[in-house]
């Protein structure tokens, strides 16, 4: 029995039927929506055609067509899979070749560096991490894969490369104002050594620094032709080698640099961007921004005291504690000086005296020792502990030290 659409003057083959009138009304595709607008409860059901010989033949043809298409898809998938596997194997082979080259280069570099008594294991770790090839010739995102592998690559540990006994880390250094000389002071003999700046350190007078480990230092910001700069270097004082680690987001001059959990926190600046803060991640060699300081300060310095980052400078009466989890600043309530002041570990050297920071019942406490008076800016780039003394070079290039036992500050005569 053949069915036709119930719509007037429509001879199209129906595909649905509806029992809204008590009898079946048949609808083609074109008139289904129109039938829904008529009064009544409409429930459409698909029209199942009688499975006669003609329909069986058509259905068989359709199934055969699907089978052919399925075979074509399977063959295409097989070809694409083989090509994809070959491409992956090809790139994987290249990746392993590069990793093998990296391993061989590092092993060769390790033998050369360890043989040099002036270089320690941390120096090797930092410089080998930077010297891994960038593999820029790879295409289609493979350079990102190589970069990830490079960052995950494990370099030799301190057990394999112990610090030579002949190496001494008891030095403090600073840059000559005219950008021509590098001065290094031996804190055991107080002898000063002057040497020309190496090539990639000639342009900038660095005014921000912090120790990484075993004679390796992070240098950042400073002055170039009276303009603040954003360059950053990792410098080894024994090997006399510096490697650029890229520019920060802001130009800095006399900013505070402090290391915590493989991340160097950089706070403030005398000018410009005096409120801006950043982080340099040593594990990825990348910069990221931090929230700004609560207020402007100049000659900013910072210290890590009992795992806490403390920040101060000229312009506030005390110091802030920076929380690296919430990225927030809390101002310490006790005022000590509104003038020049800098951190030397858990001591603050101010223009009015010496302040010691200690902990009691997990709370910060300060003890003041009014022992001297400073009239000029301290402008301390870094400080260095040697025994009971904390050494620094002031703005007049005088070697000063904090006696952590005698609780006083004194000038040291150079040999």
Image: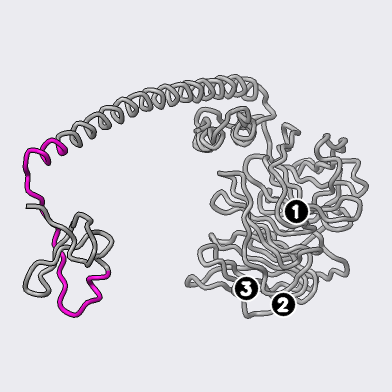
User: Dot 2 corresponds to which residue?
Assistant: 317
Query: Between residues 233 and 136, which one lies in front from this camera angle?
Result: 136
Give the left or right position of residue 396, taking residue 149 as reference. right
Where residue 214 appears, as percent x and y from the top left, is 63, 40
Is 26 displayed left or right of 319 in the figure? left
Marks 2 and 1, the one that precedes in the sequence: 1
Q: Which residue in the rendered view is the most extreme toward the right? A: 178
Q: Which of marks 3 and 2 is in front?
A: 2
Magenta-drawn segment: 34-59
The numbered dot on residue 366 is: 3
Residue at the extreme front: 9
Residue 164, percent from left and from top: 62, 29
Q: 164 or 74, which lies in front? A: 74
User: CA–CA distance between discs 3 and 2?
Assistant: 13 Å
Q: Nearer the viewer, mark 2 or mark 1?
A: 1
User: Which secondary structure lies at badge 1?
Assistant: strand
Q: Mark 1 points at which residue?
A: 208
Can you tell which quarter of the image residue 16 is in?
bottom left
From the image, which quarter does the C terminus lie in?
top right
Q: Nearer the viewer, residue 372 or 176?
A: 176
User: Do the residues under discs 2 and 1 have CB atoms within 8 angstroms?
Assistant: no
Residue placed at 83% from the left, 71% from the top? Answer: 373
Q: Is residue 164 visible?
A: no
Q: Which residue shows up at 22% across the image and 77% down it?
A: 38
Q: Residue at x 12, y 41 (%)?
A: 55
Secondary structure beneath disc 2?
loop
In x, y percent, where is residue 236?
A: 71, 37
Residue 57: numbered disc: none
């Amino acid at each position: 029995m053949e069915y036709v659409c119930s719509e007037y003057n429509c001879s199209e083959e129906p595909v649905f039927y509806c029992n809204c009138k008590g009898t079946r009304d048949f609808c083609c595709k074109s008139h289904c929506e129109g039938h829904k607008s008529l009064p009544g409860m409409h429930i459409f059901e698909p029209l199942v055609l009688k499975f006669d010989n003609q329909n069986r033949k058509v259905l068989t043809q359709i199934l055969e067509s699907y089978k052919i298409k399925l075979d074509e898809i399977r063959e295409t998938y097989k070809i694409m899979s083989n090509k994809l596997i070959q491409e992956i194997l090809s790139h994987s082979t290249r990746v392993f070749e590069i990793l093998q080259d990296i391993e061989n280069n590092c092993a060769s570099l390790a033998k050369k560096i360890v043989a040099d008594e002036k270089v320690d294991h941390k120096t090797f770790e930092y410089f080998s991490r930077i010297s891994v090839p960038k593999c820029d010739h790879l295409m289609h995102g493979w350079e990102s894969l190589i970069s990830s592998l490079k960052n995950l690559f494990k370099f030799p540990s301190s057990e394999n490369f112990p610090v030579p006994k002949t190496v001494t880390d008891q030095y403090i250094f600073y840059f000559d104002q005219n950008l021509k000389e590098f001065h290094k002071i031996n804190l055991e003999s107080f002898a000063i050594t002057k040497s020309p700046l190496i090539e990639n350190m000639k342009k900038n007078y660095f005014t921000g620094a912090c120790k990484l480990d075993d004679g390796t230092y992070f240098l950042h910001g400073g002055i170039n032709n009276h303009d603040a700069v954003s360059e950053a270097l990792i410098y080894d004082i024994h090997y006399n080698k510096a490697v650029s680690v890229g520019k920060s987001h802001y130009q800095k001059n006399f900013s505070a640099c402090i290391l915590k959990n493989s991340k160097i926190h950089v706070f403030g600046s005398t000018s410009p961007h005096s409120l801006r803060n950043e982080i340099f991640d040593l594990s990825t060699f990348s910069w990221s921004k931090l929230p700004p300081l609560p207020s402007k300060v100049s000659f900013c310095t910072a210290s890590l005291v009992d795992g806490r980052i403390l920040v101060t400078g000229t312009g506030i009466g005390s110091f802030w504690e920076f929380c690296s989890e919430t990225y927030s600043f809390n101002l310490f309530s006790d005022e000590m000086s509104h003038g020049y002041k800098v951190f030397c570990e858990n001591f603050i050297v101010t223009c009015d005296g010496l302040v010691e920071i200690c902990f009691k019942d997990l709370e910060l406490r300060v003890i003041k020792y009014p022992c001297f008076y400073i009239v000029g800016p301290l402008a301390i780039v870094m400080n260095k502990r040697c025994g009971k003394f904390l050494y620094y070079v002031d703005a007049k290039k005088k070697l000063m030290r904090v006696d952590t036992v005698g609780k006083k500050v004194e000038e040291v005569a150079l040999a």
